[in-house]
Amino acid sequence: MNTSPDHSSREHPSAAQEYRFLRIASERFGAAPTALDASQREEVERIAKHEEALEVRVLATPEALQVSVPDSQLKLAVDQVRERYESEQDFEQALIGLGMDEIELAQQLERSLRVESVLELVASKAVRVNETDASMFYYLHPEKFQRPERRGVRHILLTVNDQLEGNDEQTAERRISEIASRIEKHPNRFADQALKHSECPTAMNGGWLGDVPRGVLYPELEEQLFQMKPGESSLPVRTELGWHVLMCDHILPSGTAPLDDVVEGLIERLQEQQDRRIQRQWLAECMQSSAASSSTATSSMTSAKPGSSKQETQP
């Protein structure tokens, strides 16, 4: 199948432009360029044009001279592209369709990785966010740290499959009822029963599903769970997965999450925001500088018009 982009707005795109168009189409729409409609193609072309201009400008900065791409990182990037295809032959055919070979692909990837490295270098100059900064944000914005009620829950699952012996509807219901009865008599053995009988991967962890809010579980399970008390187990519950028995381990009431629970992630998020802000500011300055340089060069060229300087002639 032909996956070469149809650049209606550009004549004879280079292999590098073809690859950029292909990558953006895949990342943005999860589709080959030939599968894009007119509006999608226009958006991809706009993004590609903007990205190309940024790349050229970033790699012309002094910061670009301070970074390099290790061979191991470049090889990994090429291998990641290769792994998107079902076979080596498909990979090679895709390169042929783009008018590229693997060396040219590596060159394009190296440029992209260098841009990323430059932006990381720029971000490293941002002010570091510390615990004091995070604490101040936490106390100034308590509404951002509200948690809904959550319940610690374990479950045992028996799937239903009439094609498997012992898993038909009637047998599965009988087995889950027997398990529920044993747990009702010995609640402290729930984890053991999960390990022995549950067909869910959580069996290896005693059936532990985690601390869940409303809206996560199947409605049938949620209805049961949020009526239960800590330490209480449920009657058998049927969902499309099969038969379940639940146990409510504990209840975490709604409210503001403690600072200690969120401070580490908050520092990370605030730092990411700070880094992006510095990067955007730096990129804007780069583009403005580029535009100013182009304007100056254009003015210099147009100011020297033919015949604007006259030589004196002898009569």
Image (spheres, helix red, strand yellow):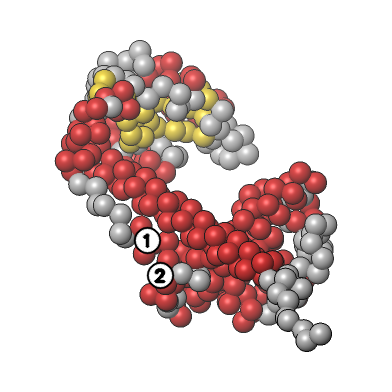
Seen in the image, is 301 located left or right of residue 198?
A: right
The residue at 23%/39% (across/down) is 134
Which residue occupies the extreme top position in the image? 227
The residue at 40%/16% (across/down) is 224
Q: In this view, does 101 lie above or below 298?
A: below
Pick the quarter of the image with the C terminus: bottom right
Q: Is residue 190 above or below residue 121?
A: above
Q: How many labels does the image show?
A: 2
Which residue occupies the extreme bottom position in the image? 314
> Residue 118: which quarter of the image?
bottom left
Residue 282: in sight, yes or no? yes
Q: Position of residue 288 (x, y in %)?
A: 52, 56
Seen in the image, is 314 located left or right of residue 20?
A: right
Mark number displayed over residue 122: 1
Callout 2, which amino acid? Glu
The residue at 70%/74% (across/down) is 309
Which element is circle 2 on?
helix
Mark 2: few/some/many CA within 10 Å (<14, 14-19, 20+): some
Which residue occupies the extreme front position in the image? 315
Q: Which of marks 2 and 1 is nearer the N terminus?
A: 2
- Which of the pair 195/289 is nearer the observer? 289
Marks 2,1: beta carbons within 8 A? yes
Which element is circle 1 on?
helix
Q: Position of residue 267 (x, y in %)?
A: 26, 44
Seen in the image, is 24 located left or right of residue 66?
A: right
The residue singled out by tag 2 in the image is: 63
- Which of the pair 49/101 is nearer the observer? 49
